[in-house]
Amino acid sequence: MPRILEVTDLSTHFTTPEGEVRAVDRVSFHVDEGQTLGLVGESGCGKSVLALSLLRLVPPPGRIVSGRIVYKGGDLMALPERGIRRVRGREIALIFQEPSTALNPVFTVGYQIAEGLIVHKMMKKKEALREAARLMEVVRIPDPGRRVRDYPHQMSGGMRQRVMIAMALACRPSLLVADEPTTALDVTIQAEILDLLRNLKRDFRLSLILISHNLGVIAETADRIAVMYAGRIVEEAGTNDLFARPKHPYTAGLIRSIPRLGDAGPEGGDRKKRLAAIEGTVPDLLRLPPGCAFQPRCPDVMRECREHVPGLRPLGDSSDTVACFKHHDPEGRPR
Amino acid sequence: MSATGAGRPLLEVTDLKKYFPIRRGVFSRISGWVRAVDGVSLRIAPGETLALVGESGSGKTTTGRCILRLLEPTSGRVVFDGTDLLSLPARAMRRMRRQIQVVFQDPYGSLNPRMRVGTIVREPFDIHRIGANRRERDEMVAALLRRVGLDPGMRDRYPHEFSGGQRQRIGVARALALRPRLIVADEPVSSLDVSVQAQVINLFIDLQEEFRIAYLFIAHDLAVVERIADRVAVMYLGQIVEVAARGEIFRNPLHPYTRALLQAIPIPDPARARERQVLRGDPPSPAQPPPGCRFHTRCPSAVEACPRIEPPLLEVTPGHWVACHLHPGPEVGR
């Protein structure tokens, strides 16, 4: 399958008074055309900075220090500012977590959807507004003809997120990057939005990068999954494989630690079933432990884990990768 | 309503209502009411966990705050261990608070940033004059911190030096200090990272076993609730629509809203794909709840009676209560 995006050794650092924060540290992954890559990780693991880095939108004091972002065969890092602006929205569109802060409160939602069409596609305002109403229908906003004139505060969180999706779709991008698109929403609304994203992906032939901390959301939406921890990807594999046979101890611990329905054991007088938690806490990026960042919490830690940082290496002849000395030695030879 | 079986309940809430005024215009005239909690009744037995679940705007947090009297309810009764809390004068209520404690959702906002954690956890002892002297209190603080999995050596640090999970442990230690019989926990794990959330859930489970505390566990995540609850009450727009024992509600949910809520949860297991009925539309505003059954506007199985008549909460099988016209009581129409 052709690759729509291939990221190699991407690093984004933030210079702070306390030191250099490696928010994204030598990250490599790819997205195949028409596929959904799920990017999962806990808060502070760098997944949102990674999303912004893909479009070179990292705010200072952050900056991309190295790496290649090859989109449809061309390196986005090599483009001048004008060139990357043409990619944003038209080729790669972003959806953020907080629809209430990402929308401008003083413009109607219809105008905000139409704006991209007026700027990028040189549409007349009237024509663009008509297209906006059509897009609102596509994202299943009821009564779009009337609601194009609504202001964001007149809409619920779920409706605002649909507006964000309509804005993202306006210029017919090929790749959609959705950063925690349902995290601020209730579960029943989340289910609707995920259902919508799946359908849009098919109808608009989109490729999707879905970023979430919620393994359930990722499991139901992604074809492949990349797991991030402390700024790095620690494992990447197909969704079924990753859940059935997680290779990295962090992935395995994460999967074990989530409560699932129907897993709580019998009720009655017996003990409530405890969860298999990962001990310890997510490390501070300014004070990373030596060696592997997960090593202080890892149940399988070995001597070399404290001395060397494991690189992301392929597993056998598959395209799956893992960064763990259980699977390869410090020289990169498989174990 | 008695879903807890025999014995006197520790907490009994009857027909609790909390209406917030909507004010408009320069004279702030009251133009309407938000019926945040609209006739909630529930019971909790000693040592039991009742989970109160629902989405934003369902009134679950307001219910918890009214029980704690952090908000004054509009009407209703809240009886704790035989005492009507709503008729207690402020001083007597303060004494009662030794037995009813609270853990909030946000471990960042609920701890005073200028106090050392040792002082935060010692404060309940100071206020209620427990322990002979400062040294004894400090020893009690150290024991508490150890119990919730924190190093007592960290007692001189400030809240910002702790992670979210550690802060929630501090909040739990403080709530635990006076050996309460009931803890109202309002979304205590929902702001925590997955790997840390499991640690804090385990802590709640262990502490209940050790101290026989009852929990009113307010949450929106049903998978978390299934771990910790003995019984589950589901709220929608200010009312309880279904109550049942944990196993019963997960195995045999009767209210269409409960079913939709359960089906909406994404399953972190690609091998277990399943059918899902996606609800259409947003929950209506609690300022203008729909007539009849409040869920009828989104209900996939609404019948003719639903928009007209409000269904009462009825016990359909022992311990299983549901407010739905499709389940009109024991043995009838089933």
Image (spheres, coloured by chain):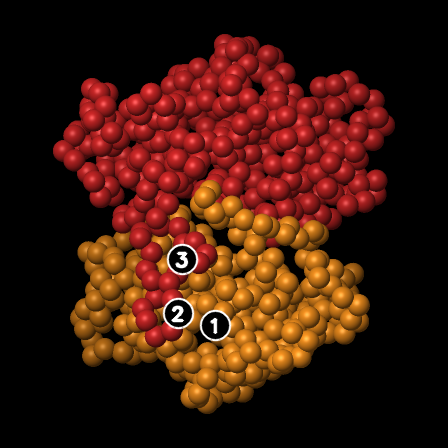
Chain colours: A red, B orange
Q: How far is disc 2 from disc 1 in space, using C-alphas?
A: 9 Å
Is B71 located above or below residue B45 in the figure?
above
Q: Which amino acid lies under the numbered mark 2 shown in the image of this protein?
A: Glu
- Tell me what residue is drawn at x 52 percent, y 83 percent: B2
Asked if the residue at tag 1 contacts the one at tag 2, i.e. Cβ–Cβ closer than 8 Å, the answer is yes
Q: Residue A267 shows which numbered tag? A: 2
- Tell me what residue is drawn at x 59 percent, y 60 percent: B259
Q: Position of residue A90 (x, y in %)?
A: 65, 21
Q: Residue B228 shows which numbered tag? A: none
Q: Which amino acid lies under the numbered mark 1 shown in the image of this protein?
A: Ala
Q: Tell me which chain the residue with mark 3 is part of.
A: A
Q: Tell me which chain the residue with mark 1 is part of.
A: B
Residue B190's image quarter? bottom left
Residue that label 1 marks: B245
Query: Where is the C terminus of chain B found, in terms of image quarters?
Result: bottom right
Is A127 located above or below residue A69 in the figure?
below
Residue that label 3 marks: A263
